[in-house]
Amino acid sequence: MISAEDLRHTYDRRHFALDGVRFTVRRGEVFGLLGRNGAGKSTLIKAMTTLIQPTSGSLRVLGMDPARDGQKIRRRIGVVQQGESFDFTTVQGNLDVYGVLWGVPRAERTRRRERLLAQFELGDVRKRRAFDLSGGQKRRVQVAREFMHDMEILFLDEPTVGLDVIMRRALLDSIRAEVRRGLTVVFTTHNLEEADYLCDRVAVLDEGRILVQDDLENLKRLYGGKKTIDLTVRDGDAARFYAALSDALGARASVRPTGGSAVILTDDPREALAKIVELSQTTGVQLEWLNVRLNTLEDVFLRSVGHEGGEDRGAA
């Protein structure tokens, strides 16, 4: 459905937002793009949806070149971007306008509109202006609106921002149902739990490059020899404690602090636990939470970004 080879893009002719990107997206899968702010995810979405023309490299969407066949591609895709975009009308009116723009016949337009209002729990606000809705309600309208027309690929750029837990899961389940009917989805998110739940394959971007890409189970097996320790300290200088722990563990483990807590990725959890207890006793810093667990997609992300960059930079 999508293929990229040595794709590069620069906005200022000095720095590359995309730097040698190579990947494929298969029919009927959810392909996740993961990365920190500024990693290149939105630039890649813009290139695939014909909004920008890459500086160099090869990109094919539905077998076509976006630079030459942009109009044909746009007829066969749907896009939900991060920014808001609404018509000056009601929620129901927004769905209707979208159906008209896509040439959906009136009877079918009405059927789809009613289904989507129910599916995305927008029935109670159907007669309210879209601009007067809460952030979460606006997001639901933006996503629901795309399903007013038929498409082969749906691009979702952080679609669950502003949604509560229940609505977020309902939205993800709705996307999964469409995928089972043959839809292909490209999905960017900062929520790695979402990616773990929804995606078939993921690619981790950092500084315009893809560090790793594979299906979720293969990635977890790849990092299967690693273990993760969750650690929270109660008293004392947490930053100093974690810095000392990082020095004590050396290259055998990676310590990633976040406030009073830290995630430790290690090949040898027994050694790490011994060092943690020893350091706690010598510094007087009390341990509040200590847990060893199997790796998650978040751990894959943290390890791939940290390893590839050559330093412990963490993730935003």
Image (tube, rainbow, N blue to C red):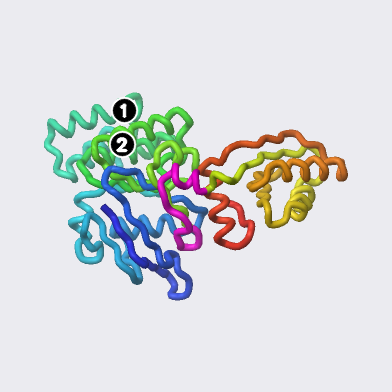
Query: How many numbered badges does the structure rendering display?
Result: 2
Kindly identify the residue that appears in the image at 59 percent across and 56 percent down: 306
Identify the residue shown where x is 86% and y is 41%.
281
Are dots 1 and 2 in contact, CB under 8 Å?
yes
Q: Circle 1 sits in a helix, a strand or a loop, which is it?
A: helix
Query: Which numbered disc covers residue 144?
Result: 2
Q: Which amino acid does label 1 sit on?
A: Gln
Horizontal and vertical percent for residue 169?
Answer: 42, 31
Where residue 261 appears, as percent x and y from the top left, is 69, 42
Residue 224 appears in the figure: yes
| Residue 208 on the magenta span | yes
Count neighbours of disc 1 (C-alpha within 10 A) and say few if under 14, some if 14 to 19, many if 20 or more: some
Residue 87 seen from this side: no
The range drawn in magenta is: 206-222
**How far apart are the alpha carbons under marks 1 and 2?**
8 Å
Instruction: Name the residue rendered at 15%, 32% in the picture.
Output: 108
Q: In this view, does 293 lie above or below 121?
A: below
Q: What residue type is labelled 2?
A: Ala
Residue identifier under label 1: 119
Callout 2: SS: helix
Relative depth, front residue between 192 and 306: 306
> In x, y percent, where is residue 275?
78, 45
Asked whether, in this view, residue 135 is left or right of residue 57, the answer is right
